[in-house]
Image: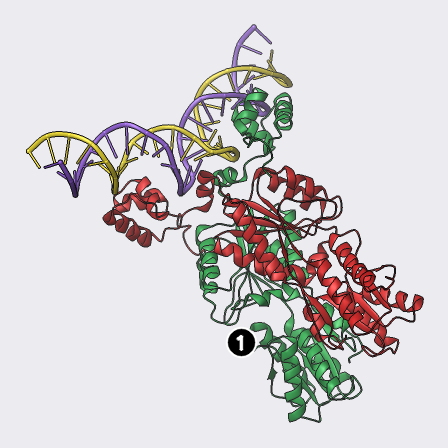
Chain colours: A red, B green, C yellow, D purple
DNA sequence: CGGAAGGCTGGAAGCGCTTCCAGTTTCAGG
DNA sequence: CCTGAAACTGGAAGCGCTTCCAGCCTTCCG
């Protein structure tokens, strides 16, 4: 940066003057609006090139009342939940879709009080053209704020106890049911689940899917053994489960990380997978591929989730009326089941 | 959103009028600038509260010529490199530091041509108050643009063939040397390395660290066996290495993912870790903890990297003159070596 | 060749906020 | 009770761009 003179940014006025037209015409050329003769259009283009002119986005934003940015806010009390590669994939998808709409991506990690206050500001001051909300906790105050906000809001996953107007979700229930059904189809009858946090909709839906499948097969569901979606919690849950129910021959873990943890515990305990216990995870993250044995899991289209959220948001911003979306999941069979 | 009347956002003028003061005074109160009597200050505050007034950030940005946002751009031809949890951690750190400075975080994945063009725009139009640049490739055109830009730019990691004025890096060389020295101190003498891409500074530095340690111990470094930092590439490299040099008793992998890949290959080949071959990784990501056996690795302060980049950027934005920073790494011993 | 339709054009009014500055008020000290 | 300094205050001029609109100039048809 800053080598030599500050070199004042050139303005539209200067472009207009150099091109010998009025500022209005120059503006029209830039936004390629109609009502500009070929000659003037070219003159302006030449001037733009000559001055290396770049429009000032802030001024444009003020005049058009559009910021040109969309925000992705990730809630949660602990910023480290964001370290989950899940979010990175969502971002990749969302980023691509926003790029198509020429929108910038603002990322808000609303973990601290301060962070949440900033999100509130953003929502109320219309600091972005729209907002995508993820990982809301039960009774998250952000939910209210979002409902009251006068800018488009799209939810990623349905927050517990709320029925947002616009959201994109993944078929957690169906995926969990499919996983459990697969275990059952393998002849396993003593299938337990390591479920995720039951104060999240994801955790609940996946648990419900497990229950549904068990009941449908005439089997008694085991009581939920809860983890928090992380590897250590999966390992701990597996230990607790084995102690309480040594007869288990199948486990559905509500996340790959927990599944990997379960594999570790089983391995340490000398139980073979899948011979003694079959394990299925959920997410289809990298960890599922590199665990030992590779984890059979429920694939969810995470980038797709991000992409669709962004697309829905763009639609809303453009005044369209999209409908909520639930993306399909599918079972990926590997060695663990 | 949009329940009921559009409810026009109230403006500073309205606040001023309601409080019975001029707009200037109201503005001063909001920015708590001096030269406002107690009485008027309170009157304005009351009006702000009553109207639920929130200043319009765009207008403020136009007037102050400050956008209130900093951008983090992640380069690379493939957007999926962003899926590496590495970046998520950088973001967590950067986000926290930016929050303290009341700056928003804009995230730019400059993978596509379109994405790169947008970054160029951002740089040239001063669409952000500053920019953090990461994962530049060799001869990345973004580097030039950044140098020419008239806004503060901080590099995360030094790009190959460039000596940026402001950067934050991690002591890759020292870390790699320490890892290799540790293997040697364990009595291993036939230590090879699975290095990362040698067209990145990270890859080169870690390879150089390995070389240094070997030479210093009077051992002959093996020629580099390159991967691309991913698990599969590590597995493949390990296979190639074993085929070519069956005598190996130690391997330094330049990333945990590659280390995990190496472990997998060794396990599949029936070689015991660390008894037959000791393995060390680099990064200290989650994968190092859950691999089998857990991977001894070089810890690098990734969140710290993000935090320091953001702090340096904030310093630059505030007109200070920070100095480049190289963060320390340290060896974390686990079971694999 | 007249006239109307319609494309072009540029002046001017914003968008909502900051900030300079000149004028006014306040008040301690003499 | 006066004086000057210090503290306030509000008018006004922007920040750089979009967009409405009234007027002008083409065309083109009858």
Measured as percent of width and height from the top left, residue C24 is found at: 50, 15
Measured as percent of width and height from the top left, residue A90 is found at: 62, 59
How many numbered marks, from 0 up?
Answer: 1
Mark 1 surroundings: few (<14), some (14-19) or many (≥20) residues within 10 A: some
* Left or right of residue B272: residue A313: left
Residue B305 is drawn in which quadrant?
Answer: bottom right
* Left or right of residue A37: residue A172: right
Note whether B116 is above or below B278 in the view shown: above
**Label 1 element class:** loop
Note whether A105 is above or below C14 in the view shown: below
Measured as percent of width and height from the top left, residue B182 is found at: 75, 80
Q: Give the camera-side residue of B175 and A323.
A: A323
Q: Is residue A169 in sight in this rendering?
A: yes
Residue depicted at x 72% and y 78%: B280
Q: Quick one: quadrant of the N terminus of chain B?
A: top right
Residue depicted at x 72% and y 57%: A81
Measured as percent of width and height from the top left, residue B9 is found at: 55, 32
Q: Quick one: quadrant of the C terminus of chain B?
A: bottom right
Q: Is residue A260 in sight in this rendering?
A: no
Which residue is identified by label 1?
Answer: B199
Residue B172 is drawn in which quadrant?
Answer: bottom right
Q: Chain of mark 1?
A: B
Residue depicted at x 50% and y 37%: B59
Note whether B159 is above or below B270 in the view shown: above
Note whether A211 is above or below D17 in the view shown: below
Q: Give the camera-side residue of B84 and A277.
A: A277
């Amino acid at each position: 940066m800053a080598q030599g003179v500050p070199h004042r940014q050139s303005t539209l006025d200067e472009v207009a003057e150099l091109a010998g037209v009025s500022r209005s015409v120059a503006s029209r050329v830039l936004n390629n609006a109609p009502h500009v003769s070929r000659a003037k259009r070219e003159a302006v283009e030449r001037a733009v090139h000559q001055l290396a002119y770049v429009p000032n986005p802030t001024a444009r934003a003020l005049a058009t009342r559009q910021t040109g940015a969309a925000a992705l806010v990730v809630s949660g009390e602990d910023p480290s939940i964001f370290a989950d590669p899940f979010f990175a994939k969502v971002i990749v998808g969302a980023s691509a879709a926003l790029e198509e709409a020429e929108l910038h991506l603002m990322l808000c990690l609303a973990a601290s009080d301060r962070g949440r206050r900033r999100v509130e500001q953003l929502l109320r001051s219309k600091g972005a053209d729209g907002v995508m909300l993820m990982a809301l906790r039960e009774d998250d105050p952000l939910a209210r704020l979002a409902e009251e906000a006068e800018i488009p809001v799209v939810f990623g996953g349905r927050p517990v106890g709320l029925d947002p107007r616009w959201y994109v979700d993944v078929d957690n229930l169906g995926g969990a049911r499919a996983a459990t059904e697969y275990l059952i189809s393998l002849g396993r009858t003593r299938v337990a689940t390591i479920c995720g946090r039951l104060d999240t909709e994801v955790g609940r839906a996946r648990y419900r899917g497990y229950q549904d499948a068990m009941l449908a097969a005439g089997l008694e569901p085991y009581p939920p053994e809860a983890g928090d979606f992380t590897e250590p919690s999966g390992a701990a849950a597996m230990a607790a489960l084995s102690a309480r129910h040594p007869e288990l021959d199948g486990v559905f873990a509500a996340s790959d990380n927990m599944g990997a943890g379960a594999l570790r515990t089983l391995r340490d305990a000398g139980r073979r997978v899948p011979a003694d216990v079959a394990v299925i995870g959920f997410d289809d993250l990298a960890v599922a591929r590199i665990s030992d044995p590779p984890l059979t899991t429920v694939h969810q289209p995470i980038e797709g989730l991000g992409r669709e959220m962004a697309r829905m948001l763009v639609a809303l911003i453009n005044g369209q009326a999209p409908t909520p979306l639930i993306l399909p999941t599918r079972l990926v069979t590997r060695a663990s089941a």
